[in-house]
Amino acid sequence: MTPLLRGPADRHDLHHHGDAEVGPGLVDLAVNVRAGTPPAWLRERLTASLDGLAAYPDPTRAVAALAARHGRDTDEVVPTAGGAEAFVLLARALRPRHAVVVHPQFTEPEAALRAAGHAVDRVLLDGDLTLDPATVPADADLVVVGNPTNPTSVRHPADLVAALARPARTLVVDEAFIDTAPGEPDSLAGRRDLPGLVVLRSLTKTWGLAGLRVGYALAPPALAAGLRAAAPPWSVSTPALVALEVCSSEAARTEADDAARALAVDREHLVAALATLPGVEVRGTPAASFVLVRTPGRTDVRARLRERGLAVRRGDTFPGLDTEHVRIAVRSREITDDLVATLREVLGP
């Protein structure tokens, strides 16, 4: 049975992220961001936007583009300085009586809620790491879930996630990795019929824009207004707003789908290669740009890979996981083959 854990934050370092794992001389398998640089057309638009830096940012065009993309009204769109800022704004704007975060997942939502003084309960997914709406307490008036979920890479069916919505509840769905599959299956971004639904999106992963801090929230008008009121003035920069606008175009979405298809091939290669290693378990069914791996009885895998120049993401900072878990980003076949050969050496006969 999936447990409901109550009480204060525990030993998990909720502010630890993959960028803390990387460093000079290390191959980065820890950060789930597009390798290399953004595409040339995007860099050109970002460079051109620098000519307007003397003016304060104006979100009008970006908001209109995002609203058109998702079939929403403009008052339902809130640009944010990355997905992480959206969690802070929600924690400031909401006053939940019973907040529940579904874990394992990205830890910043819980960290932001706790920093704002809110108590948080956890629902821990086990087994194949798929969502069971029945495990979420009926009286929860704030529920946070990722889809696909970081670090598990599991994509939950849209109807299961939608089943969590109900009157007098805010349902926050983190879709930062939803565009790692062509057509963004199981996204709820276009749903306006679900009460209290907030969908959070990010341009960081597919477009390689972690340093730009660019994302957005889709929410009912009243809640969207609350998020805007909780944000500092002009928190989203002009280049970030340009990125939101141009990456909402049909051409950009086609390119994202192509990238997602290529990613799927590389992910399948990684999963198949890991399956050849005794003592390695791929958790769940990976559907994003990373996989969650468990090495039963071995807690030294991350450190030993690091000694050999390969950085992977530790798993024990995620509630529900432990030091037997690591998260591995999907990379090229050449990097994957090097990783698997090194893992074989580390694990021994």
Image (tube, rainbow, N blue to C red):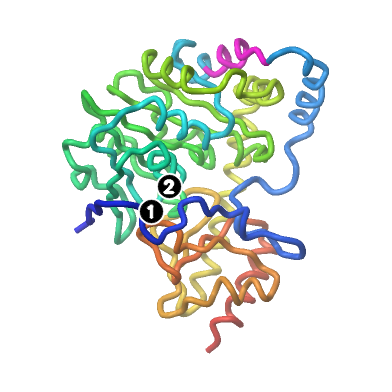
Q: Residues within 10 Å of mark 2 (few under 14, many from 20)?
A: many
Q: In the displayed image of the protein, which residue is found farthest to the front?
A: 117
Q: Viewer-proximal residue, 98 or 249?
A: 98
Q: Residue 305 — which label?
A: none
| Quarter of the rendering containing residue 93 | top left
- The image shows residue 171 at horizontal and vertical percentages of 32, 31
Q: Is residue 327 left or right of residue 139?
A: right
Q: Is residue 187 visible?
A: yes
Q: Amino acid at mark 2?
A: Thr
Residue at 80%, 22% (x, y): give it.
50
Instruction: State the residue at coordinates (68%, 63%).
Output: 335
Neighbourhood count class around disc 1 (C-alpha, 10 Å): few under 14, some 14–19, many 20 upward: many
Q: Residue at x 36, y 14 (%)?
A: 222
Residue labelled with disc 2:
149
Instruction: Confirm or deny contact between disc 2 and disc 1 (CB under 8 A).
Output: yes
Q: Which mark is residue 104?
A: 1
